[in-house]
Image (cartoon, helix red, strand yellow):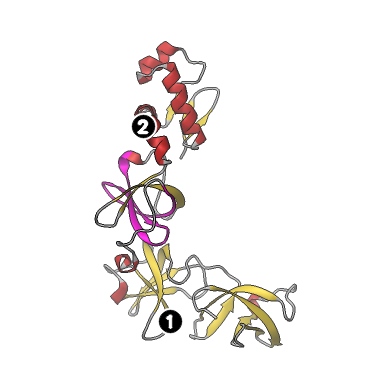
Amino acid sequence: MELGRINKLTIVRPTDYGYFLEDEEGNEVLLPNAYVTEDLKMQQEIEVFIYNDSEDRITATTLIPYVQLEEFAYLQVKEVNKFGAFMDWGLPKDLLVPFSEQKRKMEKGEWHLIFMLKDEMTDRLIGSAKINNYLYFDDIDVKQGDEVDLLLYNKTDLGINAIVNNMYKGLIFRSDIHKDIKPGEIIKGYVKKIREDGKLDLSLNPIGFRQSIDKNTAVLLDALKANDGFLELTDKSSPDDINRILGLSKKAFKRAVGNLYKQKTVTLSANGIRLNK
């Protein structure tokens, strides 16, 4: 039975307080009545999350938290007291980030990137904002062009930072951001470059796609951004109008639009092209 993770356990006996669940080694945990439904029956296998309840007892719940053990998540501070900051992670008992695990003092209502771990001293689940301690900067197990999972977490003057595959630190440069993205989103991205310091440069589009139409794409996207995300151009527009607005041939324009549409970066209508948010 793993604390901080979803476990598949067997219902073995009822009590006044709920159902006891058992793992393959005979360890038991209570699923409180609050999570017991009429369809549950003895010897049924169910998936539950195991955590410490408000009285520090090992407890099962059918609720799915926003983060599990040794994962990152973008969480909001619900309360701050003498013990630290308490984060909303989707369960009745909030996740504590002790002051010792904060980069700066957290305030109620703020959002922070948090890594969840087990405190070695107490065996309790806690969060940490000192994320570099839990990222890998050596032996990078991705290569240029790979599709990766991104958790966005911090906007800077350079772009927006991301956790890559729950293991690495990456950056999407502002020049490569052509749609509305914000901290907390989980999206797909692509490895553009692996830097000497072990950090990754990222792209929102497949690398081959970016390289093949980069020039025309940049022209079209810059024009869209400069015109509040909309251009009154379609495949029926005259070559002169396209050249006057974008400086592109109609062939180059149609190719750029087609590729952007396939990447779901723009939406096409009878009136023109709109940048997706």
Pinpoint residue 248: horizontal percent, then vertical percent. 37, 19
Give the residue displayed 51% in from the left and 19% down from the top: 235
Where is residue 17, by image quadrant?
A: bottom right
Dot 2: element: helix
Residue 269 seen: yes
Q: Earlier in the sequence, mark 2 or mark 1?
A: 1
User: How far separated are the C-alphas under marks 2 and 1?
Assistant: 49 Å
| Amino acid type, callout 2 | Asp
Residue 118, placed above or below residue 200: below
| Residue 9, image quadrant | bottom right
Given residues 266 and 170, the one toward you in this image is: 170
Residue 222, percent across and down?
Answer: 35, 30
Numbered circle sitting on residue 64: none
Residue in front for this viewpoint, 226 or 244: 244
Q: Which residue is mark 1?
A: 124
Picture layout, residue 101 above or below residue 57: above
What residue is disc 2 on?
214
